[in-house]
Image (spheres, rainbow, N blue to C red):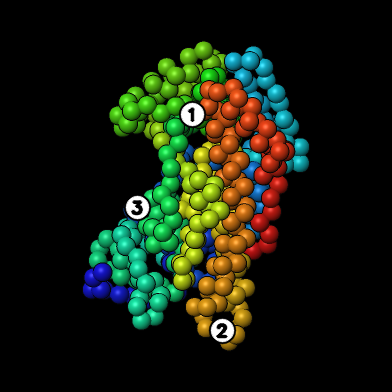
Amino acid sequence: MDLREEEEKEVVVVGGGICGLATALALHRRGISSTVLERADSLRATGVAIGIFTNGWRALDQLGVGTKLRQTAIPIQAFRDISLDKGSQREIPFGKGELRCLKRSDLIQTLANDLPLDTIRFRSQLIAVKFDPVTSYPLLQLHDGSVIKAKVVIGCDGVNSIVAELLRLKPTKLCSTYGVRGFTNYRDGHGLSSEFVRVRRDHLIMGRIPIDDKTVYWFVGRPWNPQDSNVSKDLELIRQSTLESVQGFPEEMVGMIQSSELESLTLTRLRYRAPWDILLGSFRKGTVTVAGDAMHVMGPFLGQGGSAGLEDAVVLARCLAQELSMVGLMPEAERVGAALDRYVKERRMRVTWLSTQTYLTGMLLETSSLPMKLLIIVLLIVLFGNSFGHTRYDCGHL
């Protein structure tokens, strides 16, 4: 590692996505300053939109941005699941629960706006990290050759996390499904009910959820094939191939894709960290840990990936603030290590259960075997009971 330029920082958060910014904001709320390293030139909002259930709103309220964000999205009143194969549908009211769909750009911008100036350092790409042999603190090498010596490093750098490599976490796995996501804007209003609607046929699933009175977020998931690699590079091809795959679906939803904002379209091969790898993984080494997708990337089948990252931010900041307030009881590095151990212990079972339920739900959608489907259904009922029980989780006070 070339030590041409070296600077010292207290806390470095790697990655300026939702989890990274939420973590920096949570630390800021507890009086801990941090620096966010973001490789892009500006704020990025990969993924189009994000559904936030009750547990996610609890975390956003602890971060102090819940009220602002509620003004950008309407509350969703019910979930409607339609099976075209069976010709059946069921509706589940959310009752006292809360679900809203946010534009990722709104969420990212709101988190960033509440951070102190100069917290986010753009064009700062991490290429390697190791431990200083003298101080045992982590050293981060950036793409420009500069080096940062940090007392604490939190890797919120996503699926291809450099920080996760330092922790020797097992590589993420590819789903057999890819996802297409997009927005459709209706100048005169969409007139849709305030429902999250999901339609299934064979191994294909389509969903739509209104963001506000004029904008609808939609997604399509279907089995991956090698040609999709070429399609993903052309927005018009993404739209046309998606329209072909949803032939026979309700006209309203097909028209939604036809009228979508072309620049909003994304096609992504889905990845996940296996539940058993989360259960057994080592998420702390020295004063380094991970959060968000770097820790527990999961498929979109429960819609909890983003909210789980928000929970991580609140719990991590709370643990650090509590341990660091106990001055003089032990060396600072040991106190940080103890805080990170508490964080990992608190989060491990929560994200293991989320990942397991997501994994089984994805398998149920993907498998063709009737005996396997029955086995998965039994497992889901025995292990999880209420399919929306995961939304009731409370990450606690910041």
Cα separation, mark 1 vs mark 2, equals: 51 Å
Residue 350 visible (yes or no): yes
What element does badge 3 sit on?
Answer: loop
Could you tell me if the residues under marks 1 and 2 are in contact, i.e. CB atoms within 8 Å? no
Amino acid at circle 2: Met
Tell me: 126 left or right of 196.
Answer: left
Q: Residue at x 60, y 62 (%)?
A: 345
Disc nearer the start of the sequence (1/2): 1
- Residue identified by numbered label 1: 221
Residue reaching furthest to the right: 95
Residue reaching furthest to the bottom: 328
Cα separation, mark 3 vs mark 1, equals: 28 Å
- Residue 391 % position (x, y): 67, 44
Tell me: 332 left or right of 226.
Answer: right
Disc nearer the start of the sequence (2/3): 3
- Residue identified by numbered label 2: 330
- Residue 367 % position (x, y): 53, 27
What element does badge 1 sit on?
Answer: strand
With respect to residue 172, does 385 lie above or below?
A: above
Q: Quadrant of the N terminus?
A: bottom left
Amino acid at circle 1: Gly
Cα separation, mark 2 vs mark 3, equals: 38 Å
With respect to residue 16, does 102 lie above or below?
A: above
Amino acid at circle 3: Ala
Q: Which mark is residue 197?
A: none
Q: Residue at x 50, y 45 (%)?
A: 274
The image quadrant of residue 245 is top left
Q: Residue at x 63, y 30 (%)?
A: 375
- Between 312 and 218, the one lying in front of the other is 312
- Residue identified by numbered label 3: 40
